[in-house]
């Protein structure tokens, strides 16, 4: 399976970390140069400023376009592809899981990441390799650091841009037409989650820190406030429809696999 690692060309420590990690796992991969804020023109930033529930920052627009570039590559290759951000920490199970997914049909996306947030998943599951389960994923809020994407899913994500863009993970979450699945135990976390999951962090704290998100995000004017209310109502209605076929819970993780 193809593997793309989204990374800024000058992110030497993260690139060295991924090179070492993926080599130890016996995985071949390609670095995909991330879009930087210098690549985002004022016109493009202005175009997307009002797209989401709060003002999007330039770093967030750049991050979205980085994933968008990866989606384009998936369509061009016409093959399922593991898309990683350069702060993704992989468990030893990932190579076997990727082999298991290569021929999977009727699937748009398989999420491998966990981020200490509850998800709406199916009550039943399919047993897969590495003592893992595959659950239908109906609603997620856990980031976009590690997911397998099929060309069908990439096309759906790009078509969903008609409604505007958002943070990459929020855009994926909001695209309800995706046929998505979740691996349990989750075999990928972001480096900044190591302490939470009691997993040894192989890099320093500065390298682990997100370069995109911040708790001090601008909320915007009343127009954004109204948009947030609308989307919360819409989300609540969707979650009500999911009650009969799913459960909302945390996804397990086996920290001994990391």
Image: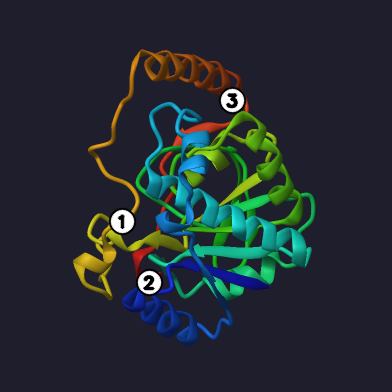
* Whole-number angstrom distance, CA of label 3 to CA of label 2: 32 Å
Eyeballing the image, is 97 above or below 243?
below
Q: For numbered disc 2, what is the local secondary structure?
A: loop
Residue 104 visible, this angle:
yes
Q: How is the image coloured?
A: rainbow
Q: Which image quarter is the N terminus in?
A: bottom right
Q: Tell me where residue 199 appears, x and y as whole percent.
A: 28, 66
Residue under label 1? 210
Along the viewing direction, whichever of 115 and 167 lies nearer the viewer: 167
Please give left or right for residue 211 compared with residue 148 in the image. Answer: left
| Marking on residue 242 | 3
> What residue lies at 46% left-to-right and 86% top-to-bottom?
24
Q: Residues within 10 Å of mark 1 (few under 14, many from 20)?
A: few
Quarter of the rendering occupied by the C terminus = bottom left
The local secondary structure at tag 3 comes to helix
Q: Position of residue 239 (x, y in %)?
A: 53, 23
Q: In this rendering, would 124 be left or right of 62?
A: right
Mark 3 surroundings within 10 Å by alpha-carbon count, few (fewer than 14), some (14 through 19), many (20 or more): some
The residue positioned 41% from the left and 15% from the top of the image is 223
Mark with earlier residue (3, 1): 1
Give the mark toward the camera: 3 or 1: 1
Sequence-wise, the earlier of marks 3 and 2 is 3
Residue found at the far left of this picture:
205
Q: Which residue is mark 2?
A: 258
Q: Position of residue 207 (x, y in %)?
A: 26, 68
Q: Is residue 116 above or below residue 37?
A: above
Distance from disc 1 to disc 2, alpha carbons, whole Å, reads: 20 Å
């Amino acid at each position: 399976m193809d593997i793309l690692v989204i990374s800024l060309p000058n992110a030497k420590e993260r690139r060295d970390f991924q090179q070492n990690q993926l080599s130890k796992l016996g995985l071949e991969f390609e670095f995909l140069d991330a879009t930087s804020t210098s690549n985002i023109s004022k016109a493009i930033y202005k175009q997307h400023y009002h797209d989401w529930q709060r003002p999007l920052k330039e770093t967030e627009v750049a991050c979205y376009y980085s994933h968008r570039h990866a989606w384009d590559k998936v369509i061009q290759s016409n093959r399922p592809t593991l898309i990683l951000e350069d702060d993704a920490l992989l468990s030893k199970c990932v190579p076997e899981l990727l082999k298991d997914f290569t021929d999977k049909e009727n699937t748009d996306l398989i999420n491998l990441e966990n981020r200490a947030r509850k998800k709406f998943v199916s009550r039943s599951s399919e047993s897969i390799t590495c003592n893992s389960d595959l659950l239908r994923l109906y609603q997620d809020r856990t980031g976009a650091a590690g997911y397998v994407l099929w060309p069908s899913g990439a096309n759906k994500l790009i078509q969903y841009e008609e409604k505007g863009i958002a943070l990459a993970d929020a855009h994926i979450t909001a695209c309800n037409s995706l046929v998505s699945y979740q691996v349990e135990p989750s075999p990928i976390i972001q480096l900044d989650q190591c302490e939470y999951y009691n997993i040894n962090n192989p890099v320093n704290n500065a390298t682990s820190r997100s370069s995109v998100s911040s708790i001090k995000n601008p909320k915007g004017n009343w127009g954004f406030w109204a948009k947030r209310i609308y989307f919360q109502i819409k989300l609540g209605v969707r979650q009500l429809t999911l009650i009969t076929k799913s459960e909302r819970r945390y996804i397990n993780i086996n920290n001994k696999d990391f």
